[in-house]
């Protein structure tokens, strides 16, 4: 990305990260980037050995995607590694590693989304347990105080599931109050339950719909977006390389897009992925074009995924090959990056 482009985009990024939503200019999504996976690997090993069991983004990876024109990276992490005991002090070693990622990313003009990649669990225990819910509030109080005012967005929880939407909403309300009580005005990404799927946002079964539970949601800091995920395979799980028809992604986003507009809220598509065949690339392109046309509600996206530890066979990877070759999905993503 050239210096001239950065001078145009940066004011909008600052608005997204630290100002109320109403002040953000409408247009196509303004935070566009990739998940740099690795920090969530080997979750059963707590804490595990850094560099062997799990890894955070390297400077070379950050530089690669910044050079490609991206301006945000979502960095998965495991709650148990950052906070070894519920409602106890954060790990100085782990926070130091995350600080280094944030510093390197900022040097490349990238915003970091800290993604607690735990599915609504801590060491296998659900946030429906009061002590675990209290722990999540405590975790974000500590992280918000530490990263307050930095070029960091807060991803509250990756893909909560097995939790009634109304119960999850009550936990989120507590977490948001704790974050804002620190004085942090950073952008917060608020997921729903049911794996936070855009296609399932309106579904009422299994504890009520996210749409109903979050219809009246308010952020004391006025700077949040609803985090949604949307894969393009047959069951929206992201576990199959194939895609549906060319409008699969568009069709799966329509209801959530209308809902976001109806409640005057923003959305952020934090995970989506597609195989590299021609049909999937066309489907991916059409979905991103739809988000471009609805940039008044879709504030950004991060593709799943990149990272040096993905095998060459992983269908969704956009990590450059060892010979430096660009993955076909990157050619599609480039066409829809923030301008």
Image (cartoon, rainbow, N blue to C red):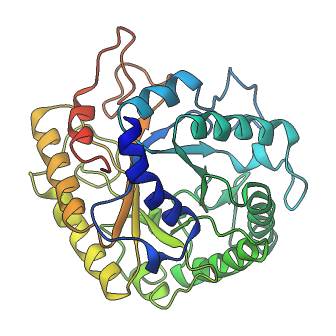
Tell me if residue 116 can be seen: no
Q: Quadrant of residue 137?
A: bottom right
Quarter occupied by residue 33: top left
Q: Is residue 266 left or right of residue 39?
A: left
Picture residue at 37% right of the left edge, 21% below the top? 320
How many labels sit on residues?
0
Q: Is residue 78 above or below residue 198?
A: above
Q: Quadrant of the N terminus?
A: top left
Relative to 54, is 185 above or below?
Answer: below
Query: In the rendered view, would you say 35 is above or below 198?
Result: above
- x and y, in percent, of residue 324 in the image: 35, 13
Camera-nearest residue between 9 and 168: 9
Q: Position of residue 259 (x, y in %)?
A: 31, 82
Q: Quadrant of residue 93?
A: top right
Please say if 94 is above or below 194. Answer: above
Q: Residue at x 70, y 73 (%)?
A: 175
| Residue 149 seen in render | yes
Residue situated in front as seen by the camera: 256 or 188: 188
Seen in the image, is 337 located left or right of residue 36?
left
Pinpoint residue 179: horizontal percent, then vertical percent: 72, 71
Residue found at x 30% / y 74%:
256
Q: Is residue 128 left or right of residue 260?
A: right
The residue at the far bottom in this view is 216
Picture residue at 90% right of the left edge, 53% below the top: 89
């Amino acid at each position: 990305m050239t210096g001239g482009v950065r001078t145009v985009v940066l004011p909008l990024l600052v608005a997204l990260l630290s100002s109320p939503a109403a002040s953000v200019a409408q247009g196509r999504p303004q935070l566009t980037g990739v998940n740099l996976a690795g920090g969530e690997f080997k979750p059963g090993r707590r804490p595990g050995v850094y560099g062997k069991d799990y890894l955070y983004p390297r400077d070379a990876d950050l530089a690669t995607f910044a050079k490609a024109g991206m301006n945000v990276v979502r960095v998965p992490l495991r709650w148990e590694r950052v906070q070894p005991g519920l409602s106890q002090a954060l790990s100085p070693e782990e926070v130091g590693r995350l600080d280094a990622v944030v510093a390197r990313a900022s040097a490349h003009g990238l915003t970091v989304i800290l993604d607690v990649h735990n599915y609504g669990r801590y060491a296998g225990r659900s946030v429906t347990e009061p002590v675990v819910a209290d722990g999540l509030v405590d975790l974000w109080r500590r992280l918000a105080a530490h990263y307050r005012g930095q070029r960091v967005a807060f991803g509250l929880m990756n893909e909560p599931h097995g939790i009634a939407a109304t119960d999850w909403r009550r936990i989120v309300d507590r977490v948001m109050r704790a974050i804002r009580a620190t004085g942090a005005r950073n952008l917060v990404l608020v997921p729903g339950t049911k794996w936070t799927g855009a296609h399932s946002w309106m579904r009422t079964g299994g504890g009520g719909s996210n749409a109903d539970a979050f219809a009246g949601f308010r952020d004391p800091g006025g700077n949040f977006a609803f985090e949604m995920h949307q894969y393009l395979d047959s069951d929206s799980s992201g576990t199959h390389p194939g895609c549906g028809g060319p409008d699969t992604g568009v069709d799966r986003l329509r209801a959530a897009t209308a809902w976001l507009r109806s409640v005057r809220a923003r959305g952020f598509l934090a995970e989506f992925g597609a195989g590299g065949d021609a049909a999937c690339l066309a489907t991916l392109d059409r979905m991103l074009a739809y988000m471009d046309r609805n940039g008044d509600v879709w504030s950004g996206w991060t593709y799943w995924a990149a990272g040096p530890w993905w095998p060459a066979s992983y269908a969704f990877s956009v990590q450059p090959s060892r010979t430096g070759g660009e993955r076909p999905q990157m050619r599609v993503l480039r066409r829809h990056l923030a301008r």
